[in-house]
Structures are given as C-alpha cells and as structure tokens.
C-alpha cells in the first residue's frame, strides 16, 4: 500500500541525528544560475535558517533538569535542529549569501514557545512540538516545490524535512502514553 508513495518520496535515515560531512562535501555554489533562481534560493535558505534557530531555541527552553525519557528525546531533537541550522548556514555561505539579521526575532519567538510551554507542563510541551513541526513540514514542502534547488541542497532539505516528520511522530507517540 505504501509503495507508490515511497517511489515518489526518497527515504532518509532519521535515526542519524547528525549526518557526517566530509571535506569534499563543501563547495561554492550558484555558478551560472540566473539571478531569479539565486534570489529564490537565497530567500528559501534564509527562511529555513531562521526557522531552525527558532526550533532549536524551543527545545532548549522546553528542557528541564528532570531525568526522564522526554528530556532525553528533547536533547536529541535539539541536536537535530542545531544540525539543520548548520546545514542552512553552510549552504547560505556556499552560495555567497548571509543569514537574515531578523532571525534574532525568531530566537525570541522560540524562547516564548519553549519557555511558555514548559511552564504549562508535559502535554503543552508535546502539543507545541507537534504544532510547530507540522508547520515546518508544510513550509519545507512549499519551499521544495517552488524553488529550483541544486541537487545536493535539495537532498539536505529533504532529509531535514524527514527529521521534522520524525519529531511529529515522536511527540505524538509520547502524547498517546501521557
Ligand atoms: Fe529542523
Ligand atoms: Fe524538528
């Protein structure tokens, strides 16, 4: 039943929280691209980079000192988002772009969501995670669909989107046992 979907969407190993990057994986990009294509890529990478700052900040502030399963999973999710943030920062500079200065505002939003949900307890933490990650998956889908990425950047975006999907499933699973 799931087979036609698998043929369309490549599968990524989301148990790899931080994929390896070797020296030869880094390169300068965008040579020969049209100005329109470059402008779209720049906007997309800045958006993704900013959203990943928000995501890692949410998880950071949801974490408590308590030794429990959820905190362990939140640390893994935070690490995952830090990796995504790195992914897009690297791609921005490979293209010769710079991150958005406005991302500081998204740190504040991440703090508000993260710390706010932590004050409200476990259910609020998990529901915030599901809500934010669902938005992210849709956002990723839109950017994958509308922007003409280079193949390597596209694979990174697809892997990161698969990770976000994994986060949704993890938080949903914990909500069911709560
Ligand atoms: Fe992410
Ligand atoms: Fe995520």
Image: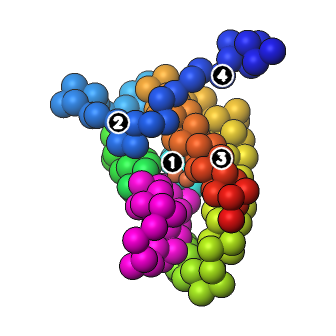
Pointer 2: residues within 10 angstroms few (<14), some, or many (20+)? some
User: Which dot, 1 or 4, sits closer to the camera?
Assistant: 4
Q: Residue under circle 1?
A: 45
Give the Cα distance between marks 3 and 1.
Answer: 25 Å
Pointer 4: residues within 10 angstroms few (<14), some, or many (20+)? few
Give the Cα distance between marks 2 and 3.
Answer: 20 Å
Which of the two labelled residues, at mark 2 and mark 1, occupies the earlier sequence position?
A: 2
Residue 144 in sight in this render:
yes
Tag 2 and tag 3, C-beta contact below 8 Å: no
| Marking on residue 19 | 2
Which of the two labelled residues, at mark 4 and mark 3, occupies the earlier sequence position?
A: 4
Q: Residue under circle 3?
A: 169
Quick check: is the Cβ at mark 1 less than 8 Å away from ligand 1? no
Residue 176 percent across, percent down from the top left: 73, 56
Give the Cα distance between marks 2 and 4.
Answer: 19 Å
Q: Circle 3 — which element?
A: helix
Give the Cα distance between marks 1 and 4.
Answer: 21 Å
Give the Cα distance between marks 4 and 3.
Answer: 18 Å
User: Which dot, 2 or 1, sits closer to the camera?
Assistant: 2
| Marking on residue 125 | none
Tag 3 and tag 1, C-beta contact below 8 Å: no
User: Which dot, 2 or 3, sits closer to the camera?
Assistant: 3
Task: Count the labels in the image.
Answer: 4
Residue 55: say if magenta: yes
Q: Quadrant of residue 127?
A: bottom right
Tag 2 and tag 1, C-beta contact below 8 Å: no
Q: Residue under circle 4?
A: 9
Q: Quadrant of residue 117?
A: bottom right
Residue 37 in sight in this render:
no
């Amino acid at each position: 039943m799931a087979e036609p979907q698998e043929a369309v969407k490549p599968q990524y190993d989301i148990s790899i929280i931080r994929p390896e990057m070797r020296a030869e994986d880094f390169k300068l990009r965008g040579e020969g691209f049209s100005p329109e294509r470059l402008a779209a890529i720049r906007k997309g990478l800045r958006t993704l980079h900013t959203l990943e700052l928000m995501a890692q900040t949410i998880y950071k502030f949801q974490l408590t000192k308590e030794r429990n399963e959820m905190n362990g999973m939140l640390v893994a999710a935070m690490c995952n988002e830090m990796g995504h943030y790195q992914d897009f920062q690297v791609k921005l500079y490979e293209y010769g772009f710079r991150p958005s200065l406005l991302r500081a505002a998204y740190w504040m939003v991440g703090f508000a969501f993260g710390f706010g949900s932590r004050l409200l307890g476990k259910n609020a933490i998990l529901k915030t995670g599901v809500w934010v990650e669902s938005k992210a998956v849709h956002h990723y889908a839109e950017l994958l669909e509308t922007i003409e990425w280079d193949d390597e950047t596209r694979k990174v975006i697809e892997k990161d989107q698969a990770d976000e999907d994994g986060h949704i499933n993890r938080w949903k699973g914990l909500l069911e046992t709560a």
